[in-house]
Amino acid sequence: MTGVPSRVALVTGASSGIGAATARLLAARGMRVVVNYLRSGTAAEEVVAGIEAAGGQAMAVQADVRQAAAVESMIERVRATWGGVDVLVHNALTPYAIKSFQDMTWEELGGKLDDELRAAFAVTKAVLPSMTGQGWGRIVYLGTGLSRRPREGMIALGTAKAALAQFARYLAQELGPQGITVNVVEPGPVADTKISHVLDDEQKQRQVAATPLGRLARPGDVAQAVAFYASEDNAFMTGTTAAVNGGMSMY
């Protein structure tokens, strides 16, 4: 690879949790990583500092991925520094209500659907020109097992991520001839993330008991699956979904 610039990866929502673990792993594997964040600037800079201390290359860029203009501004900054984005890992999680359908308003359900697809639409539109121009690209969306396995109170997130998964399959069909793969990673419950507090200790123990591998996922477990989909090694998988849940989905 001497003399060949390393791939540029944009990881949205990368200041903590799965996004941060993914950014660190992609950088460790030689990619130049854009650590996107919304509000957690200090945490994002800490991720960058850790990557650089380990000999990698990274930059933190603020953008609300629901806003097309903010996304375009972010991509322009990346382009000016490193050129086009080769790999998109769309991990940013927009807010959602946790409540039953009977207690939910259309603004809560429809708003989450709109935010989810608006963000995926905006970031994908922004990175596609460089990918199509070179005939190579990797797009990975972070979904959730809740899109297939309902859990009480999670209708907004589960429905929105199910829509995202189908969006990804349509893109995989359309973009495959242009050398771009599109895949989804669907974690089950993940420890040490911003949303892991949703489960109390009793619920976590039930989740662990339902998992053949005997524990909840860690951010690094999910990052490993993302990193494969994002790599040169993934030459012939597109339109697929990786369930990173320790075997929970078998039941």
Image: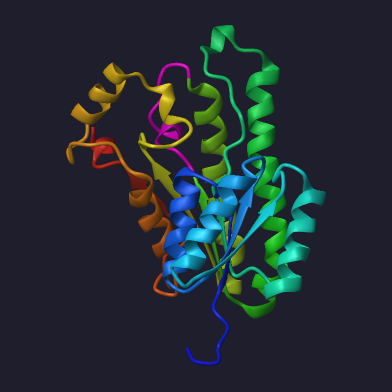
Could you tell me residue 140's position as x and y percent?
51, 56
Could you tell me residue 130's position as x and y percent?
69, 72
In this view of the protein, which residue sits in the foreground, 48 or 224? Answer: 48
Could you tell me residue 113's position as x and y percent?
64, 32
Q: Residue at x 65, y 79 (%)?
A: 134
> Quadrant location of the C terminus?
top left
- The answer to whether residue 250 is visible is yes
Dominant secondary-structure state across the stretch colored magenta:
loop
The image quadrant of residue 73 is: bottom right
The image quadrant of residue 127 is: bottom right
Q: How is the image coloured?
A: rainbow
Q: Residue at x 40, y 54 (%)?
A: 223
In this view of the protein, which residue sits in the foreground, 79 or 15? Answer: 15
User: Residue furthest toward the right?
Assistant: 69
Q: Residue at x 58, y 72 (%)?
A: 177
- The answer to whether residue 230 is visible is no
**What is the total number of numbered labels drawn onto the structure image?**
0
Is residue 149 located in the magenta-colored stretch of the structure? yes
Could you tell me residue 224's position as x and y percent?
36, 57
Residue 15 versus residue 204 in the image, above or below: below
Which span is picked out in magenta?
Answer: 143-153
Q: Residue at x 63, y 52 (%)?
A: 36
Is residue 232 located in the magenta-colored stretch of the structure? no
Residue 137 versus residue 223 in the image, above or below: below
